[in-house]
Image (cartoon, rainbow, N blue to C red):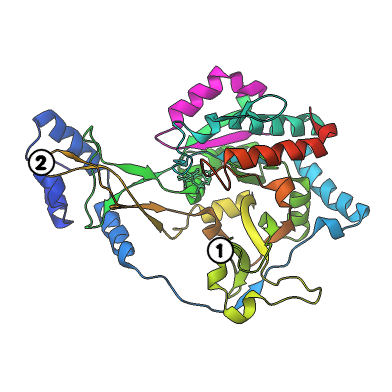
Amino acid sequence: MNEKEIIKNLEKYNQPRLINILNKVDEKTKKEILEEVSLINLKEIERLYANIKDTVEVDVGELKPVKSINPDKLSKEELDKYENIGIDILKNNKFAVIIMSGGEGTRLGYNGPKGTLKINVEPKPKYLFEIMADSMQRANKKYGITIPWYIMTSNKNNDKIVEFMEEHNYFGYPKDYVGFFKQGELPLITEDGQLVLDENYRIRKAADGNGSVFKSMRERGVLDEMKEKGIEWVYIGQIDNILLKMVDTLLLGVTIKEGSEIGTRSVFKDFPRERMGTLCLKNGNVKVIEYSEIPEDMIEAKNENGEMLFGESNITCNLFSLKAIDKISLKDLPYHKAHKKYSYMDENCKMVEPSDPNAYKFEYFIFDSFEYFNQISVVRGKREEDFAPIKNKEGVQSPETAVKLYNDYWRRHADERM
Ligand code: UTP
């Protein structure tokens, strides 16, 4: 597209602020902005803007609880049977791990990618990437294998993460088995549908959510690479859960035995209205919903054992078959919008610091991929064993609470340390 065509397109898609700025900047800056605009799908931006105004869908549909396996209720023989299926996959090099690290970590407010945060665990402080590397190495040693480890980064943090891992010699993980791939990003849009420029005259964009992992795997060649390596199962977890068990042989075994394409570790709600994403079947498909979407008479419903019917909750500890990833990577997951505060350049090329949220960011969520399946295998985990997230600077789900959970865990499992 030439200059005239790009500007015409900006007019067509109603971007007067950008056009005003283009009329005020020097030729070099103008060329750079236009080049960036030419790579943006303005039609898609229009669609995103329409999405801002969408109201929330209130389709209750038919809700059913998911089946789950509680390992505490299994005999030693049953546990072994499942685990051996999982171990077989590991030993035949059919398993890989992805750690998603493309998030902005805004709530934590740490200046750098979350994985490069050092926390005060016992017996010595560790970086989050180091904790992940240690966990993978324990599994490698236990099973006599080397698991391919992929780290999903964003455009913004990729170089910092790669440099950090190089600088720390991959925390002893065999470098040839570590891969990085960037996720996608989407432009921000202001409340009046305008694209936003930052102080360097670049269009402000943000990572497009953890659900970007599937498309990004396809676009960055990771899916093909895994196929070539004979990988059949991929664990996808998040960098900020320091009790993540990515090499989960029980989950692998249960998922394969039940003939599912997706498996997940859940935790059980403490009380019916606890604010957690609830796993259920909605109109026959797997879905994660808020407790507020469960009809009032069902929130407190119990099964024949007196347990909450809708208690299994999502903690983003997910296992996917490569076939499932292949399928999902071709789908358009729905967008979720977040209303946030972003500085922007006004028509006179002056930066404005808003005091209230002024723009929308758009994200795909990994759990929306479940909806393409009518079955999911759920293995019930425990908060103290599986879930120590670091989301906030202080208070709940902060480094302080996660460190306590981590230290307590390792006191109970001292014999499993490397
Ligand atoms: P969160 O959704 O909790 O977001 O990410 P965040 O970026 O860490 O923190 P906030 O919301 O800005 O405070 C859950 C996991 O998904 C990854 C994160 O790195 C984390 O491991 N993630 C999130 C991505 O990889 N990409 C994204 O675009 C968003």
Question: What's the residue at 23%, 32% (across, down)?
Answer: 200
Q: Position of residue 407 (x, y in %)?
A: 72, 36
- The residue labelled by disc 2 is 348
Q: Which residues are magenta?
A: 146-175
State the residue position of label 1: 372
Q: As rendered, which of 113 and 152 lies closer to the eye? A: 113
Q: Give SS at disc 2.
A: loop
Few, some or many residues within 10 Å of mark 2 (<14, 14–19, 20+): few
Residue 158 visible, this angle:
yes
Above/below status of 66 relative to 20: below
Taking the magenta stretch, the answer to whether it contains residue 154 is yes
Nearest the viewer among 44 and 51 is 51
Q: Residue furthest bottom?
A: 297
Q: Position of residue 251 (x, y in %)?
A: 74, 51
Kind of residue at badge 1? Tyr
Image point 55% across, 33% down: which residue? 115
The amino acid type, in three-letter code, at marker 2 is Asn
Give the SS element for disc 1. Answer: helix
The mark closer to the camera, 1 or 2, is: 2
Q: Are marks 1 and 2 in contact (CB under 8 Å)?
A: no
